[in-house]
Image (spheres, rainbow, N blue to C red):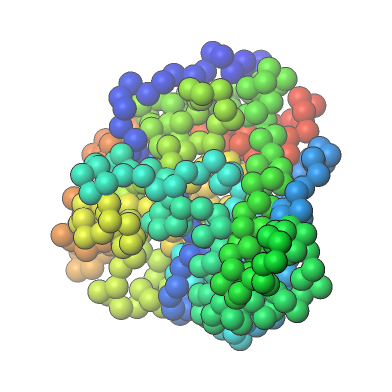
Amino acid sequence: MPVALETLFVLPRRASFLGLGLLFLLGACGGGGGSSPTAAPAGAASSPSPPASAPSPTPKPLSLQAQLGERIFHDRNLSGSGRMSCATCHDPAFFHGPPNSLPVQVGGAFETEFGTRAAPSLRYLERLPAFTGTAQTAVADLRGGLMADGRVDTLAEQVKLPWFNPREMDNGNAAILARKLRGAAYASDFGRAFPPAAGASAPDDDSLVTQASQALQSFQIEDPRFHPYDSKFDWVQQGRAQFSNAEARGLRVFNDTQRGHCASCHPSFSLNKQPIVFTTLGYSALAVPRNTALQSNADAAAFDLGLCQSPHVAVKGRVESCGFFRIPSLRNVEHRPVFFHNGTFNSLEQVLRFYATRDTDPAQWYPTVAGQVQLYDDLPLALQANVERNAPFGPRRTMSDADIADILCFLRTLSDGYTGPATPPPPGCN
C-alpha cells in the first residue's frame, strides 16, 4: 500500500551538518582547470539516451535579460573552438548536466583539453547564497558559494570562469569575448535588455561581458526548467501522490541518524515552507577514492583539496578545511553519469555502497600496496583527520543491502518530470 508523506519525516537528533554528501561538484564547463585524463574509463565516451520527462507547464514570459541569456547559453561561437556553448556541458535534455559519462569534460581551443572536476547539473542553484563565514567560523558551519570550493558568490560570476578557462571555453580575454558578442545575431538585444542611460557611450569590453553574464544569471533564475520542483517527492509533499512501501522505507533510512544519516547533509524537510533542495548549502569531507583516470593524478604529490584552496579569507590557509567540497542538491541524482568532484564513481548504487562500507571494507575502495590498504588515498596523510566519520561511516556498518536498495528507490523520487500517480514505481520499488 502506498505510504503518505507525513508518516515519514524524522528530524535528525543532532545538529551536525556533516555526513552523507553525494558530491559531483563543479569542474569542467564550470570550474576546473587541469590536465587531461590519461585514459577514459571503459564506456566513458558513450552518450546515454536523454531521459524521458513530463511536459513542462507553460512558463511565464522571460524578461528581456533572460531571453538574451538563453541565446547566449546556446551560442557555440562563444568559445575558442567555436563548437562549445554552455549547453554543451549542461544539456537541457540531460537535466542541464553533461550528455556523456566522461569523468571530466573536454574543452579548449581545439577540444583537446580536459578539466579536473566533473561537470555538474545547473539545476536548483537559484537559491544558493553567497559564501558566508569568517576565519573563526567552524568549517562545518561554512555555507554558500558556487563551484566545488565556493569561490564565487553569484551565477553571473560563475559563468565567467568557464568562459576564460583555457581548458574549457577558452575565450582568452574580455576583448576577444566582447568582439564575439558584438558580432552575434542577437547583438542588438543588449541595448533592449540593458538600456543605456541618456547620452551614455556603448559599453566597453568588460561591461559587455558583465552584461552577458548577468543575462545568463537571469535566464537560470527565471526559466523554470532550471528548477521545476515537479518530482514525485514534490507531488507527495503536495498531497497529490503517495510513496510506495520501498520508497517510504528508503526515506526512513535516509533520515535515520543511526543508519543512512543522509539528512544531516541533505535535509528532507523544510523549516521555511520553501521547496526542499536537499542540501545544507555547506561542505563535507568524504575521502572519495582518487580517480586514476585523471592525468593530473599521475603526480602522486598532486591533490585537489577543495575548500582550503578557495580564495575566500575564511578558509585560505586553514588546513582543517582541506578535503571539503560543496554539498550539492540530490535532485535528479539518479540521472547523474558520474559522481563526486573527481567523477570517480559512475553509479548511484556504487556511491551508496561506498558510504556503507568505506570504513568496514576499505580494500573495496582504496588500493592495496605491499599488503597495506592506502586509506583515504586522495588526501595527504597529514590531512586525513578532516575526514567525516559519523554514520554511515565508522567501524560498524550501519546500512544493510536492503537499506541501500530502499534508499535508491527513495532517491529516484527526486527526479524531475513525474507524471502522476498512474506512473508505476521503478522495478523493485513497489
Q: Residue furthest bottom?
A: 110
Q: Residue at x 40, y 66 (%)?
A: 291
Find the residue positioned furthest to the top.
7
Residue 185's spot in the image, x, y percent? 81, 73
- Residue 221: x %, y % from top left: 64, 46
The residue sitting at 31% across, 27% down in the picture is 15
Q: Residue at x 21, y 44 (%)?
A: 136
Residue 270 in sight:
yes
Q: Nearer the viewer, residue 172 or 398?
A: 172
- Left or right side of 48 for 288: left
370 or 320, nearer to the observer: 320
Determine whether 33 is above or below 11 in the image: below
Q: Position of residue 216 (x, y in %)?
A: 65, 58
**In terms of image quadrants, where is residue 255?**
top left
Left or right: 249 in relation to 17: right
Pick whichever, 317 or 258, lies toward us. Answer: 317
Placement of 224 over or under 268, stated as above or below: below
Left or right, 16 with reference to 125: left
Residue 321 location in percent, x, y? 26, 52
Residue in the image at 54% along x and 13% along y: 7
Picture quarter with the C terminus: top right
Nearer-the-camera pick, 273 or 277: 273
Quarter location, residue 312: bottom left
Q: How many marks?
A: 0
Q: Quadrant of residue 91?
A: bottom right
168 w.r.t. 142: above or below? below
